[in-house]
Image (cartoon, grey):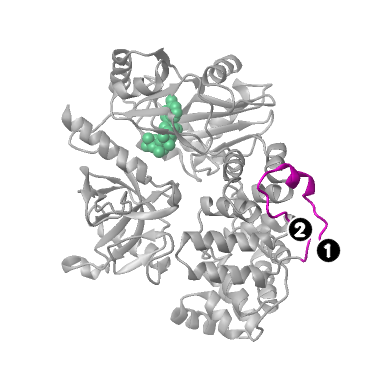
Amino acid sequence: MTANVDATHASQSTNVTHTPQDGASLTFFELSACFAKLDATRSRTEMMELLAELFVKTRPDEMDKVIYLLQGRVAPLYAPIEFGMGEQLTAEAVAQATGLTVEETRRRFSEVGDYGSLAEEQIAIEQGNLTVAHVFERLTEIALTEGEGSVAKKVSLLADLIRQVGKQEVRYLLRIPLGRLRLGVGDPTFMDALSFARTESKSHRPAIERAYSISADLATVARVYWHGGVDGLQEQIHVTVGTPVIPAASERVKTMEDLVLRLGRCAVEPKYDGIRCQVHFDGENVTMYSRHLEDLTGMFPDVVAAVKEQAAGHSYIADSEALAYDVETGAFLPFQMTTQRRRKHNVAEMAEKLPLRVVLFDLLYLDGVDLTQQPYGARRAKMLGFLQDGAVLQVTENIETDSVAAIDAFFADKVEHGLEGVMAKKLDSLYHAGRRSFDWIKMKRSYQGELSDTVDCVVLGYWYGKGARSKLGIGALLLGVYDKERDVFVTISRLGTGFSEEEWVRMREHLDDIKSDGRPARVEAEVEPDVWSLPTHVVEIQADEITRSPTHTCGRRHGDELGYALRFPRVIGFMREDKRPEDATSVLEAIRLYEVQIEKAKT
Ligand code: ATP
């Protein structure tokens, strides 16, 4: 065995203690043993070590499959590939494979609450010998099967797999197509584990993270890294039209003076409040991704046509904001109007009713050249140069200044015109894919008496209701934010108002679906809700202020007694379908909001 596929690259890199080998194929039994251990731990460090141990045993050509399955998928998160296997079809597959009737399976499910555990009871085999690659291929086939007869085919493919695996394997196998694997491993933990598996340190994490930020596909990054190390990533992972780049994000500062102190002479653009839209055009095909890499292409046929027309002959990737506008006056409409364009049905009708304007504020790629490593000024010059005039796409206006008064005046003008505020950008800054940095600083209009910004919180559990609420079975939510540095969720508030009765019930149903026995992995809390749920759903919260709190763990470091908490929180809308838990507000952002508020109180 052991042809060393990576000898050249390994010898060039420092600190490499492990070089991947060609060995025996990883079995699905080995992978499911890792699933079980991950399931049993709440420690992020232990998760990282368990993953690193698994990766060391994994062949380079199997690495992407292992990562996809750990994510409960067969394709990158941004690819709209789903299994299409709900509970009914799973019950049918279990019945076919075990000899139970569908009715018996459903009945037993209502007692056990998990098809994986149910099938485990019914299976005699302790250990199967299918490889990860085989299971991955069959699951992919299930996901890609469509059209006439596809339902029966999906069921029989899954039943076939069930017949060939052992107890522990079936438990996790069935959770994958149902979307219930939920091991609670975040991207940072995967990336640390990859570096650790190869170098016994986190030294390769920055290179892995860069590759991930420009390709948005951890599995492919892992495969390339496992083959060729950091050199391999640099040679093979590039900004590519059609593949989403994880968008850059901005920071906040307390005052306009601080902004100028940080950036010096800078570019200041309006901050538009619409739908972020990353536009890709390869000369023929258009693809558009949202801030969280949802595919928007089918929703915006009017923009697709304009993207082709206004930059014919070029291939490019642009970062932009799409906004509905008033056709008579040309004024941009509020976010609530634009967001009506985010739909899968009646698309053409809505395009007619609420046409979009797309304001480009950055250019990441043009005609074969990756621009993300070029300075703002150079990117902007190219952006102004390649676009033809037209009704839909336009380049954002900006001013260049180091005067607080000039920025103040620009800001006031934009707010008066209904925009959200301004975005200031460092003149020589690169495009920081996937990172929040002080090279972009946002200033938003504030609401008197309220926090200057809303907070995106992850729901961590709920309390049963008292009094009138008791009939709903839910009275309050436990909310958290994301500690990005440590890849854990910490608590920031209890929320008891803002939903209608019907919404409370819906929320309870969602949370029961992702109920956790005890505090979930990666959650740090000192309060205990009646029911814990896995960090999955994000809600947008407006609060009066942020206060220091002895109760909540947000921002509490060792030895620091006080955390941060939201005062008078209320929910905006129902749930942010477009956000993943790791996209919630971070601890550092919450602390910055607190500081901005203290500063404002002084003026
Ligand atoms: P929010 O948009 O509510 O401030 P966020 O966390 O999404 O929160 P950032 O991650 O800092 O904000 O990203 C900036 C947001 O502002 C993006 O959604 C982007 O589309 C939008 N935006 C509007 N105008 C601009 C602009 N001129 N330059 C950059 N981003 C802009």
Describe residue 66's horizontal placement relative to residue 425 as left or right: right
Count of marks placed on residues? 2
The answer to whether mark 1 is within 8 Å of ligand 1 is: no
Q: Real-space Cα distance between discs 1 and 2?
A: 8 Å
Does the magenta run of residues contain 23? Answer: yes
Residue 596 at x, y percent in the picture? 26, 34
Q: Relative to the observer, which residue lies in front, 478 or 302?
A: 478
Please give the label number shown on residue 583: none
Residue 340 at x, y percent in the picture? 41, 39
- Describe the element under mark 2 as helix, strand or loop: loop
State the residue at coordinates (29%, 18%).
408
Give the residues drawn in magenta, as a range. Answer: 1-24
Q: Relative to the observer, which residue lies in front, 482 or 326?
A: 482
For mark 2, what is the residue? 21
For mark 1, what is the residue? 1
Magenta span: helix, strand or loop, mainly?
loop
Q: Split into 4 quadrants, where in the image is the N terminus?
A: bottom right
Does the magenta run of residues contain 243? Answer: no
Amino acid tagged 2: Gln
Residue 338 at x, y percent in the picture? 41, 35
Q: Relative to the observer, which residue lies in front, 288 or 60?
A: 60
Give the answer, above or below, for where 40 lies relative to 190. below
Residue 481 at x, y percent in the picture? 36, 50
Residue 82 in which image quadrant: bottom right
Give the answer, above or below, for where 572 lies relative to 28. above
Contact flag, marks 1 and 2 (Cβ < 8 Å): yes
Amino acid tagged 1: Met
Label 1: few (<14), some (14–19) or many (≥20) C-alpha neighbours in 10 Å = few
Whether residue 84 can be seen here: no
